[in-house]
Image (spheres, grey):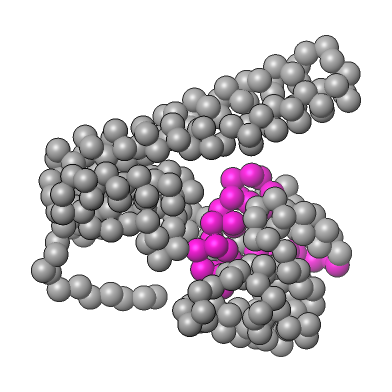
Amino acid sequence: MPKRTDISTILIIGAGPIVIGQACEFDYSGTQACKALRAEGYRIVLVNSNPATIMTDPDMADRTYVEPITPEIVAKIIEKERYAVPGGFALLPTMGGQTALNCALSLKRMGVLDKFEIEMIGANAEAIDKAEDRELFREAMKRIGLETPRSRLANASDLKSADKARRNAEIAQIETCGLGAEEKQKAIADIRRRWEADEPERKRRYISKGLTEALEALEEIGLPAIIRPSFTLAGTGGGIAYNKAEFIDIIERGLDASPTTEVLIEESVLGWKEYEMEV
């Protein structure tokens, strides 16, 4: 593949802190990416919340930020670094595991990547979504004729959409009213503060709705059932339920662990042989 001459700066998002003895491959792969890309002449901006890594050594990247890996923080870093030097700016999210992938998707949904004309390389948002979202992945397998175990999604998409629509309507109403610019900013900031403060209550409602849908799915799928949360690190929050009590416990745990409050309830294929291929 020829070198991309339209890109001058590449932002690499690390994996953050990892359990000792596990997943050191993220640090290794990130370090190798920094070395290889700098050798090709690219300016490297690195974000990682874990200072105890090789990739955060001072000479590994041109600019290193030891900051929380959240969309809000990374957005500020992008704003600072985007036009620091001329040329294109790209985001490489595949060196930091689930943490980096989730952050990159959030930046895309927030409009940050479009605003600053940043391209995702290695894997684009559509590919990540298709691999991480249980429903999209199932549909992709169906399109290519690959059979999958019977399954159903449990989430609170309708509640989330309604909540976001109400918030956006409030903001739109303020923006079109006769208030001055400063008063509008204060009113919108107040709406956003209330939105953040209400997060625990919304999460509780979403989990309750997801559990209701999961119990309906249980009638169709039966036990034992495999529960797979969406967008979690190494399937955190998932498990196999052999009875209803276990099912409810794992569903609640999985919905809480999933940043999208979504789980896939899948029929068990225990006893089958499993072959895994990583690309």
Q: Residue reaching furthest top?
A: 178
Position of the N terminus, as image quadrant, is bottom right
Q: Residue at x 72, y 55 (%)?
A: 73
Residue 4, quarter of the rendered image:
bottom right
Vertical position of residue 151 compared to residue 144: above or below: above
Q: Residue at x 37, y 34 (%)?
A: 208
Question: Can the viewer see residue 58 in this picture?
Answer: yes
Question: Can the viewer see residue 140 in this picture?
Answer: no
**265 left or right of 182?**
left
Vertical position of residue 146 compared to residue 256: above or below: below
Vertical position of residue 22 compared to residue 67: above or below: below
User: What is the magenta range?
Assistant: 85-113
Vertical position of residue 32 compared to residue 153: above or below: below
**Tally of marks:** 0
Magenta stretch contains residue 91: yes
Magenta stretch contains residue 108: yes
Q: Residue at x 50, y 74 (%)?
A: 19
